[in-house]
Every structure is written in C-alpha cells, then in structure tokens.
Image (cartoon, grey):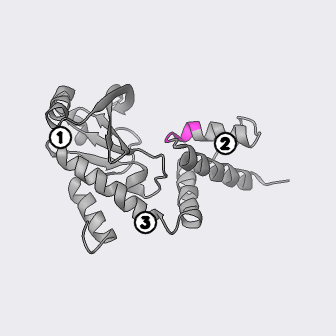
Amino acid sequence: METPSRIRQQIAQVCARIMIEEGIGQYAMAKKKALHRLALEGNQDLPSNEEIDHALQEYHRIFRFMKQPQFIRRLRRIALETMELFQDFSPRLTGPVLEGTAGDHSPILLHLFPETPEEVLLKINQTGIPFKERPFAEAELNSKTLKIPVIELCREEQVVKIFLYPAVALRQSPKNAPPRASLKKLRKLLANQNPQGL
C-alpha cells in the first residue's frame, strides 16, 4: 500500500502533466482532474502548489530538457516585446513563462496597471492588434475582492492574457500574488539566459 506522501507526490506529478499537456493554468482544476484520473477520493491530502511547481520543473527536466530553454527564451522575448508596447502601464510578467515551467499550451500572463482600462483599449486600437475581451478575473486587495478586466492578444501565434489591475495595485500586491517581473527584470533575465543578445 502506498504511503500518503507517495500519493501526494503522485498527484503532484499527474497535476504537472495535466497542466503542461492540456494547458491548464489553475492548480485547483489540475488537482481535481488528477484525482479523477487516479480514481482517488476528493478528501485526499493534496499536494501544495509549491509541490506541483517542483513536479513541473522535474517534468521539464526529464521530458523537455533539450527544447525547454529555447522555448522559454522565445516566450519571454514575445512577452518583452508586448510589455514594451504597454510600458506606460507598468507591465509585469508573471506565471509559467516567468517561472520557466510553461508548456506548449501555456499563455503568456501580463499584469498592467492603468488608471482606467479604457487607456489600454485605446492603445491596442491605435496599434491595430486584434484582441478579445475575456471574463473578469478576481483578486483580493486590501481585504476587498476586485473584478479584474482581462483581454487576450495573439502575438506570433502565442496567446497573451493581460490582466488590467487598478494603478494602486502596483504598490499593493494582491493576497497570495505570484512573483512578477518588470521590464527591467525581464531584460536582465533574458540577457543572462542568452548572453549573445535577444
């Protein structure tokens, strides 16, 4: 009989595979699907998000070690170019592309901090980039739940999801916010990843 820790590890590994192969970005959804795939009950001791992140890194190390660095470099370059378009709105890169765990179906996730969402929409219309509006996301800020407008672009056949946070949120990170990288930090990351330049 498998130990609880071994089951947690197994769930984390299946979660990682689901997130990469099916392009799922939500840990909770991946855990639910993993339980179903493993025919386990919902009251299992589930792995933490950090354990799943570790499993994601292991998956890439084992199965994508040849292609992953170049793949991540390409996504980060697209992210950088998109962030430069929106540099007036203090763009930040977050999620799997920043963490280096993105799979083939992972979108590039950007946070912008405009005074109003309309400013960003005006900028997009000026550039002529096609976009779609997506359902609002939710974020907790100062004990309040905010509805965050979300728009989606396609850049070099890569989905870019942009979350339009209020400008004040730049200095007040939402509760449990993942790491974020500014333009300066992303440029440095790319320079270190590719010393010859972008």
Look at the image and tell me in which quarter the C terminus lies. bottom left
Residue named by callout 2: 34
- Residue at image coords 23%, 52%: 81
Residue named by callout 3: 69
111 in magenta:
no
Answer few, some or many: residues within 10 Å of disc 2's Cα (few below 14, many 20 plus, some between 14 and 19): many
Compared with 133, 61 (above or below) is: below
Compared with 110, 146 (above or below) is: above
The type of residue carrying mark 3 is Pro
Coordinates of residue 153 in the picture (x, y in percent): 31, 37
The type of residue carrying mark 2 is Ala
- Residue at image coords 57%, 48%: 21
Coordinates of residue 142 in the picture (x, y in percent): 31, 32
Residue named by callout 1: 89
Q: Which residues are magenta?
A: 25-29
Report if the CB atoms under discs 2 and 3 are less than 8 Å apart.
no
Helix, strand or loop under label 1: helix
